[in-house]
Amino acid sequence: MKLFFKNVVKKFYKSYGERAKQAEQNLGINWKAVSHALRVAYQTKQILTEKKITYPLKEAIFLKQVKAGKFNYLNLVAPLLESLMTEVKTLAEVSTLPVKTDIKFWDNFIIDEIEDYYRIGERHKWHDYDDKIGEDN
């Protein structure tokens, strides 16, 4: 049994070592997945700090360059992603955002906006929701 685990560990280290070498040379990196991870980190940070998401993201050009593999993964991208993840975790721990979403409120909001758009039923104004958006329901 020891020999089996020794071989499994040896195979893991060999595989990990190969991936580490590839990352060092910017090879074998799923840049699309990395760019999505960065995008989500930036969006989450903005939600936690500003309570909104802005489109296009101010980091959009940088994210497109990451997706195209224009940067060194080990020296720039990986440390940046790690730093953002740490920052987001810290922000989430002290966030004042509600833990649970008021689904009924948002369902009604969406229905009202669709009705408004297609001029169906009673018209509702944005200001009807202004006081409720962001409330801890």
Image (tube, rainbow, N blue to C red):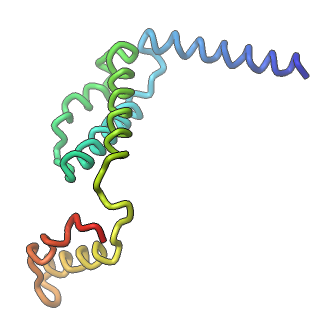
Q: Is residue 65 left or right of residue 17?
A: left
- Farthest front residue? 94
Give above or below for 113 relative to 57: below
Eyeballing the image, is 137 above or below 41? below
In the displayed structure, 40 sits above or below 16; it is: below
Residue at x 88%, y 19% (from the top left corner): 2
For image coordinates 45% across by 10% down, the residue present is 24
Residue 122 position, x and y percent, is 13, 89
Q: Determine which quarter of the picture holds residue 115.
A: bottom left
In this orientation, which residue lies closer to the viewer: 1 or 66?
Answer: 1
Q: Residue at x 20, y 80 (%)?
A: 112
- The answer to whether residue 135 is above or below residue 50 is below
Point out the residue furthest to the bottom here: 121
- Is residue 28 toward the left or the right of residue 89 in the image? right
Q: Position of residue 29 (x, y in %)?
A: 45, 23
Residue 35, image x, y percentages: 34, 33
Q: Quadrant of the N terminus?
A: top right
Q: Quadrant of the C terminus?
A: bottom left
State the image quarter where residue 82 is shown: top left
Give how far across and how far down residue 26 sits, in percent: 41, 14
Q: How many marks?
A: 0
